[in-house]
Amino acid sequence: MVALLVIIGAGIFLALTVPFIPSLAMDMMGMLLLERPEDVEGWFFYGRLLEWKGHDIAAAAAYRSTVNLNPFHKGAWKRIGNLCIKFGDFEGADEAYKFSV
């Protein structure tokens, strides 16, 4: 009986906290990038978090920060291309994809 209560309690705890984890991660990354604006992988990870949460314009800006710091970051160029397609900017996507290979 105690084990069942522990499992139910853990399930309720996870159900209440898991939806907030990505938002907390985004907030933490944003604060870290204020302290470390030259962190290429930090900008890329931040962009992925933003994109995952549906903040596509902010994600594109984070990916642009990534490629401004490292013009050879293929992953960021690919994601910029994907977002350009989503925005209907096919020329921008073509240009971004050229840098992603």
Image (spheres, rainbow, N blue to C red):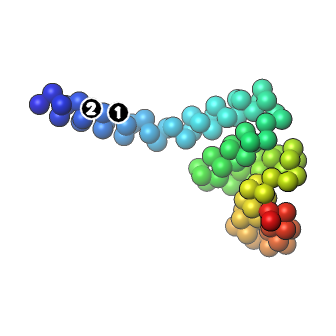
Q: Residues within 10 Å of mark 1 (few under 14, many from 20)?
A: few
As drawn, 68 above or below 27: below
Q: Residue at x 43, y 35 (%)?
A: 17
Q: Residue at x 71, y 29 (%)?
A: 32
Could you tell me which quadrant the C terminus lies in? bottom right
User: Type of residue at label 1?
Assistant: Phe
Percent coordinates x, y for residue 11 in the rendering: 30, 38
Which quadrant of the structure image shows residue 95?
bottom right
Please, what secondary structure does the residue beneath circle 2 have? Answer: helix
Residue, disc 1: 13
Determine whether, in the image, residue 25 is placed left or right of residue 46. Answer: left
Percent coordinates x, y for residue 19 in the rendering: 46, 42
Which quadrant of the structure image shows residue 26?
top right
Whether residue 37 is visible here, answered yes or no, is: yes
Tell which of 19 and 10 is nearer to you.
Answer: 10
Numbered label attached to residue 93 = none
Percent coordinates x, y for residue 8 in the rendering: 24, 36
Tag 2–tag 1 contact (CB < 8 Å): yes
Could you tell me which quadrant the N terminus lies in? top left
Residue, disc 2: 9
